[in-house]
Each structure stands twice: as structure tokens, then as C-alpha cells.
Amino acid sequence: MTTGKAKSALGEAEKLKSKSLTDLAFARLLRDRLSLVAIGILLFLTASSIAAPLITGLLNVDPNTTDASASKYLPLFSEGHLFGTDNLGRDHLARLLYAGQVSLFIGFMSAFLALVIGVTLGILTGYFGGLIDDLVNWIITTLNSIPVLVLLIVISAVFKPTAEALILIIVLITWTPTTRLVRGETLSIRSREYIVSARAIGASSFRIMRQHILPNVFSLTIVTLARNIGIVILIESALSFLGLGVQPPTATWGNMLSKSREFYKVAPHLVFFPGLLITVVVLCLYVLGDGLRDAFDPTIKD
């Protein structure tokens, strides 16, 4: 009888055992249907773009092959061209898939690199302060004092706008908000009791930043990453629309939208699909960002 009660008590203790914030966040995220739909759409579009060679091979189409006989903007569901063709007879679906590779690569890579730089500098400046904090804040203030669009146009005009150059350009202007956000959080964390205790027992600054501060800003950074990817895709689309992004024949959703705007009356599908994909991806990223913010909010009770 006593053994039964002990097992029951242990069972109750296991049920009541506190979970980490990450465990709670993933559990909340799995219950958030809207965020799950957004994740599903993003995974589908990303997988489709990655599998572009396979899909175009099965459909026997190529993104850069022109066809003089199909230069009259074949409409949707034309024979051999599911999404029609553009003014040069190039298959529109194939170009959308390959453009997705470039646009998503620029979005994910730029946002990730900006996050790495922003988190690293934010933790260093917030933890140490002093000269390094003043220097980084001066750089941030200087960059933020220049209108973003002007800075983008000048840099894009100087450098050849390849995908790699565009990533570096975007990273240059998008790391500052993350740095300021992480710096503020680090300033709050460094004065807490467990940080003071870690210093007292001889923990190195690197260990404190890695083991105690970085995990505590993780939720902040993951939300920032999701939103920044959407922002970067919009920046790339804006630059391409101005003719300063990745240049044809390399396709991106942005330059496809830019080049097709003069044909919207005779071939509206050339405008509709790139614009739709940009809108859907950015919307899903913002929805996911909101879902992650709510999931990692420690004040929300289940």
C-alpha cells in the first residue's frame, strides 16, 4: 500500500515537474494552427525551389531557354507551359522556381549573417560596455542617420549587384537593430543574481556570455530572425524593382516583377505570380514571428 502511494506521489511529481521555456514554447507553437500553416507554406515553397531542377526536368522546361514561337505571352495551362511564358517565350513556372532559390537564399543568408553579427556585438557591448560599447553605438548611430534607401542605392550602384554582393549590402544595413535589441537585453541580464554568482565562483566572461546570456536572448533572436527574413526579401524586391538588384538572366522574384510590369495588360500572370509569392512568403514569416513571440513569452500561462 505504501509502495502504491509512493508511486502515485512520484507520478504526480513528474506531472508537476517544471518545463524549460523552450519546451513550453514548442508546445505552444504546436497548438498555434496559424503558425503551423505558415511553417507548412514556407517549407513547401522552400522545398519546391530547392527541387527546381527535378521539377523542371520532369516538365521538360528550362528557365532560360527562349522560344520564338511562344513569344506572345502564352497564357496559363498552355500546352507544355503550365504557368504560361514570358515575352521571350521562357517558361514562367521554371523561372519562378529558380527565382525562389535566389530570393530565399538572399533572404535566409542575409538575415542569418545579420543576426550573427547583431547578437555577437550586442552581447559584447552590453556585457563589457566602455570603449567597445561607445564605438559600436557610434557606428550604429552613423549608419542609422543615413536614409536606408539612399544608402542601398549608392552601395548597389558601386558594387556589381550579384546575389553574394547583395547579401553583403543588406547585411551592412540590417545588423544594427538586432545589436541594439540584444545589447539592451544583455544590460538587463548582466546585473542579475545568477550572473553575479557566476562571476563570484570564477566563471570567465566568455563562459558567462555563452552559458548564461546567449540562452536568455535566444527567444529574442529567433523572433528577430523570422521577421528579418521577410524584411530582407522585401528589400531585395525593392532593389530589383529599381533595377539595382540581381540582374537578368538570373531570375529573382523581385526582378521578375520589375521586368513584367510593362506587360501587365497583355500578360497579367507575369505580374501576379511573383507578386503573390513575395506577399505570401513575407506574410507567413510575419505570422511565424508573431507566433514565436507569443510562444516564448514567459508571462503567458497555459
Image: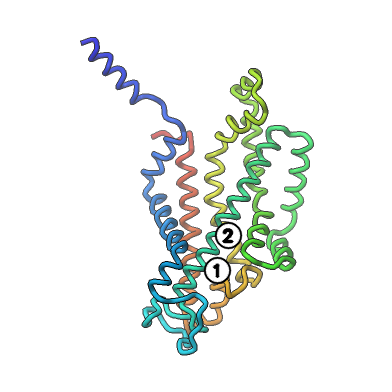
Q: How many marks?
A: 2
Q: Quadrant of residue 82?
A: bottom left
Quadrant in the picture for the N terminus? top left
Question: Are discs 1 and 2 less than 8 Å apart at CB?
Answer: yes
Left or right of residue 41, residue 190 in this image: right
For label 1, count other residues whose C-alpha is less than 10 Å away and answer few (under 14), some (14-19) or many (20+): many
User: Circle 2 sits in a helix, a strand or a loop, which is it?
Assistant: helix
* Depth check, front residue: 151 or 166: 166
Q: Is residue 277 left or right of residue 302?
A: right
Q: Position of residue 26 (x, y in %)?
A: 42, 40
Element on which disc 1 rests? loop
The residue positioned 46% from the left and 86% from the top of the image is 70
Q: Position of residue 144 (x, y in %)?
A: 72, 52
Rendered position, 17 above or below 144 = above
List the residue tagged with mark 1: 252
Quadrant of residue 191 within the rendered picture: top right
- Tell me the amino acid under the disc marked 2: Ile
Mark 1 or mark 2, which has the lower sequence index? 2
Q: Position of residue 264 (x, y in %)?
A: 50, 80
Mark 2, residues whose alpha carbon is within 10 Å: few (<14), some, or many (≥20)? Answer: many
User: Which quadrant: the C terminus?
Assistant: top left
| Residue at x 66%, y 20% (from the top left corner) | 202
Three-letter amino acid code at the position of disc 1: Thr
Residue 108 image offset from top left, x and y in percent: 55, 55
At a point 48% along the width and 58% down the height, the residue shown is 283
Residue hosting label 2:
106
What's the CA distance linking mark 1 and mark 2?
Answer: 10 Å
Q: Is residue 153 above or below residue 268?
A: above
Name the residue furthest left. 1
